[in-house]
Image (spheres, rainbow, N blue to C red):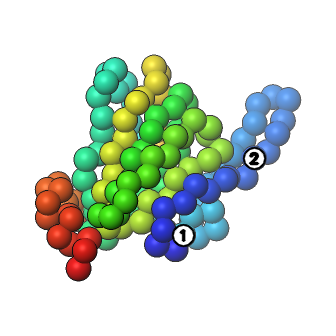
Amino acid sequence: MKTPKIIELSRYFDPRGNLSVIEEYKDIPFKIERSYWIYDVPGGESRGGHAYRKNNEFIVALSGSFDVVLDDGKAKNTYHLNRSYYGLYVPEGIWREMCNFSTNSLALVLASTKYDENDYLYDYDTFKIMSNE
């Protein structure tokens, strides 16, 4: 799977509170090597603004909502995440930016690689050249 995609996660309903699950290779198409979360984003701020050479991600709005703008070098698509049982699969080689965070939003990001500063592409012009090769 190399195309961004919204994936619906399993939901288990219970009067005491609901539960959802994310399992590597079952719900998402990669092994989870790293997880991190983004929170307390001030109004009007955005996160991301880069692409990865090798890393794949799965992004879930655990609380609140935000937009994820994805750019493959040819077209941009915006995904609005606002439910904890939906996540966005983002393959490597896609420019991503997260914006329009609601108050108290919490974004969980599962990554296919350990942190590697050399995997990041921060220059959009370089990204455009690489995405058109």
Front residue (pair 112, 3): 3
Question: What's under tag 1, amino acid-wise?
Answer: Pro
Q: For residue 53, what is the image quadrant?
A: bottom left
Q: For residue 40, what is the image quadrant?
A: top left
Could you say whether the residue bearing mark 1 is in a helix, strand or loop?
loop
Front residue (pair 27, 76): 76
* Cα separation between marks 1 and 2: 19 Å
Q: Which mark is residue 11?
A: 2
What residue did someone put label 1 on?
29
Q: Residue at x 33, y 45 (%)?
A: 97
> Does residue 55 show up?
no
| Furthest residue toward bottom | 133
> Does residue 95 show up?
yes
Q: Residue at x 46, y 34 (%)?
A: 66
The image shows residue 55 at horizontal and vertical percentages of 34, 65
| Residue 20 left/right relative to 127 | right
In this picture, is 96 found above or below 3?
above
Mark 1 / mark 2, whichever is N-terminal: 2
Q: Residue at x 20, y 72 (%)?
A: 130
In this picture, is 98 found above or below 106?
below
